[in-house]
Amino acid sequence: MTIPGKDTRLTPYGSSNLGMDLGLIDDLDVPNELFFVRSNGEIQTIDPAKWTLPVDGEVERRIELTLADLEAMPQVEQSSFLECTGNGRSRFHPKAEGTTWKNDAAGNAVWGGVRLRDVLEMAGVHETGIEVVSQGSDLETMQRGLPLSVAMQPTTLIALRMNGAPLPVAHGFPARLIVPGWAGIASTKWLSGLTVSDRPFVGPFQGDLYVVYDADGTPVQPVREMPVKSIISHPSEGATLPEGAVVTGFAWSGYGGIEKVETSLDHGESWHKAAIVAEAGPLAWVRWEQRLVLPPGSYEIVARATDRRGLTQPWTAFWNQKGYFMNEIQQVGFSVAPQGDSPNG
């Protein structure tokens, strides 16, 4: 599979999905060519000159905006992470249903565009409106309902740019939603319509497909905010490191900024605070480092993040049929080579 503009080191999953090994990233923001791709339908190619965004439903006036209209509105930029609900699904045991993502379906970018609330205010939302239903162009059923309170947050965007460039085709050009902290499914790509509804939206990408079901098939919760998580990006499993190695990783939470990241070499008997070396506010992930001075031998390191609400990672994630919300503490085994030997980390 070839997706234009994408690095060939990305891992293909099916016809229109690409995973990004976090070991490829050495900065806070992920370059567009390396950013993971998750699409439920086929990637769309849309003529921006013919594209419009209608806004209707429980509004005072129906409006229809062109790309030029949106570009003429006040523009904002913000750094925020984006994560597929099934990121890390392959770590569930027994195996859960769905694409077997490793830890490669998350990224951070600077998103630019207009506030969704500015567009809604142009249309004038009736008091009866409680949700904003977004329509994507990839599937007729690609619709998601967003509570009006979330849609009106100043951080919820209609994004037109990604890392300073127009949205790449695979990431929703010419316009997409960005709902910080929420699962990626909420950030509708190839946005083609907004409808303000007077009732909770029910549809396949709102209901059954994006609901957490326990082992017995009982619905537990809808897919909304992503849980706190830390991923070790270096070393990789089984790597051999020099004696003065640096362990690196990323951490994020859909419930607030990251307060701290800790690592342990004794299965949690003792924890050591890692240094947060790059951050860009509460909506973004952080990059962290832990310097190790260890004698030659074999080791296992674990990392856990805690967000500013005090939420921290569990040792074992809640198993669910669809393999959503994998955020259990990650463990990576590695070796330290004697001086003079060649590391391979």
Image (cartoon, helix red, strand yellow):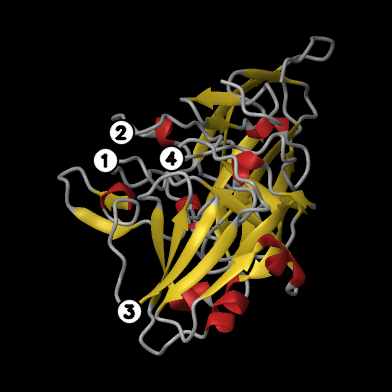
Q: Disc 2 versus disc 4: distance between alpha carbons?
A: 15 Å
Q: Position of residue 286 (x, y in %)?
A: 69, 52
Eye-nearest disc, 3 or 2: 3
List the residue tagged with mark 3.
198
Specify the amino acid type for callout 4: Asn
User: How many angstroms separate mark 3 from mark 2 (CA)?
Assistant: 33 Å
Camera-side mark, 2 or 4: 4
Please state which amino acid type lies under the numbered disc 2: Glu
Q: Residue at x 53, y 56 (%)?
A: 191
Badge 1 or badge 3: first in the primary sequence:
3
Q: Give above or below for 81 relative to 23.
A: below
Q: Which mark is residue 179?
A: none
345 and 85: which one is in front?
85
Residue 133 x %, y %: 41, 66
- Real-space Cα separation, disc 2 to disc 1, in angstroms: 6 Å
The answer to whether mark 1 and mark 4 are in CB contact below 8 A is no
Task: Please give the count of numbered marks on the rendered protein.
Answer: 4
The residue located at (72%, 23%) in the rendering is 295
Asked if marks 2 and 1 touch (Cβ < 8 Å), the reply is yes
Q: Amino acid at mark 1?
A: Gln
Relative to 267, residue 174 above or below:
below
Residue 210 image point, x, y percent: 33, 51
Mark 2 Cα shell of 10 Å, populated few (<14), some (14-19), many (≥20): some
Residue shown at 62% from the left, 55% from the top: 175
> Would you name the residue on which mark 2 appears?
97
